[in-house]
Amino acid sequence: MARVAVDALAKHIVPVVSTKTCVAYGDWSKRNGIRGHAYSPVKGLKQALQKRTMAVSMDEFMTSKLCSHCHQTLSSVQYLVDTKLVKRKKRKGTVLIRNRPEVQIEEKKCYGVLRCDDEGCGACY
């Protein structure tokens, strides 16, 4: 990427130059990029952001596994679902009621939602 394009990208991220704004920049340790994807100008973009605002390098290790508030582990959300709800039966024009003891409830996993394991925190991501 040309220097002009990197500066334009930094201007798009931080439109107004300010020292009150802070941009956290991930410091991924693998420098040669991801296979099949174009390389990004990591160093140049970070320098362009530092000219416009305060850019902080952030360690990305375990950021998707730990709560950002209390640093406890995160687990996936579970919710209850009626799996075998018996349908109402009709017998010669009369509707019979459902037999409620036959209803089974299972816990299903909710993908994409994480909850903090600490009871006092209760943060969801």
Image (cartoon, rainbow, N blue to C red):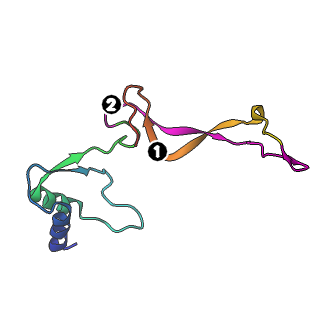
Query: Which amino acid lies under the numbered mark 1 shown in the image of this protein?
Result: Val
| Residue drawn at the location 15% of the way across and 73% of the way down | 4
| Residue drawn at the location 52% of the way across and 47% of the way down | 111
Q: Nearer the viewer, mark 1 or mark 2?
A: 1
- Nearest the viewer among 71 and 89 is 89
Q: Specify few, some or many for label 1: CA neighbours under 10 Å numbering under 14, 14-19, or 20 or more.
A: few
Residue placed farthest to the front in the image? 93
Earlier residue among tags 1 and 2: 2
Tell me where residue 99 sits by quadrant.
top right
Percent x, y of residue 93? 87, 50
* Residue highlighted by disc 2: 70
Percent x, y of residue 103? 73, 36
CB under 8 Å between callouts 1 and 2?
Answer: no
Residue placed farthest to the right in the image? 92
* Residue highlighted by disc 1: 113
Magenta residues span 68-95
Work out whether 45 lies above or below 111: below
